[in-house]
Amino acid sequence: MGPSYCNWRKLRGEFEGSTPDLLRLVIRAIVVFLMSSNRAILPKLIIGETGNFPELARFYRTEVSDRVLSMFEGIVRRGIERGEFRDIDPKHGGRLVFQPIMFTAIWRASFGALDSEPYDYEGLIETHLDVVLKGLAAYAKS
């Protein structure tokens, strides 16, 4: 999925900016990939063929989905450790950050062609980032 997982791990470790900025950078890069690559159809195909090809589904889960979720879990954990995000379960936080993006890719591959006018996926992702980052934000101390 897009640039290799190893590059994202390196970026996460070397990124000197804030965690919200890191999350914006990673999500926007993934969205550019999902909106411009013909490989963005893979999640839809894998889901549709899981029953027929369980080994393929297992491979995709292990080599793609689990790695991406782990990356987002690590980003959420980084934000918590730095006091930028409130203390939540990073596993849940990582899924909440990524799953709407994956569903958007699946929606685009399934129903996007039926839209009467081109949908503003970039606007959707920017709204997603706004809502997620406000939800993750550390509570202000009184």
Image (cartoon, rainbow, N blue to C red):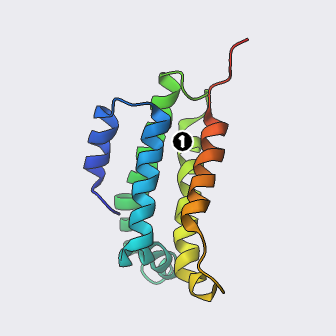
Is any atom of residue 109 visible in this view?
A: yes
Circle 1: residue type: Lys
Residue 1 as seen in the image, left or right of residue 130: left
Is any atom of residue 70 visible in this view?
A: no
Residue 21 as seen in the image, left or right of residue 39: right
Farthest residue, direction right: 142
Number of numbered markers = 1
Indicate the quadrant containing the C terminus: top left, top right, bottom left or bottom right.
top right
The image shows residue 15 at horizontal and vertical percentages of: 33, 34
The image shows residue 1 at horizontal and vertical percentages of: 35, 63
Residue 78: image quadrant is top left
Q: Residues within 10 Å of mark 1 (few under 14, many from 20)?
A: some
Q: Nearer the viewer, residue 95 or 126?
A: 126
Q: Give me the residue at 60% from left, 40% from top.
A: 133
Residue 138: image quadrant is top right
Q: Nearer the viewer, residue 60 or 128?
A: 128
Q: Give me the residue at 46% from left, 84% from top.
A: 52
Residue 33: image quadrant is bottom left
Q: Give me the residue at 35% from left, 66% from top.
A: 59
The image shows residue 2 at horizontal and vertical percentages of: 33, 62
Helix, strand or loop under label 1: helix
Q: Nearer the viewer, residue 55 or 62?
A: 62
Q: Nearer the viewer, residue 7 or 42?
A: 7
The image shows residue 112 at horizontal and vertical percentages of: 58, 81
* Above-or-below relation of 49 to 16: below
Give the residue number, with chain letter if any, for mark 1.
Answer: 91
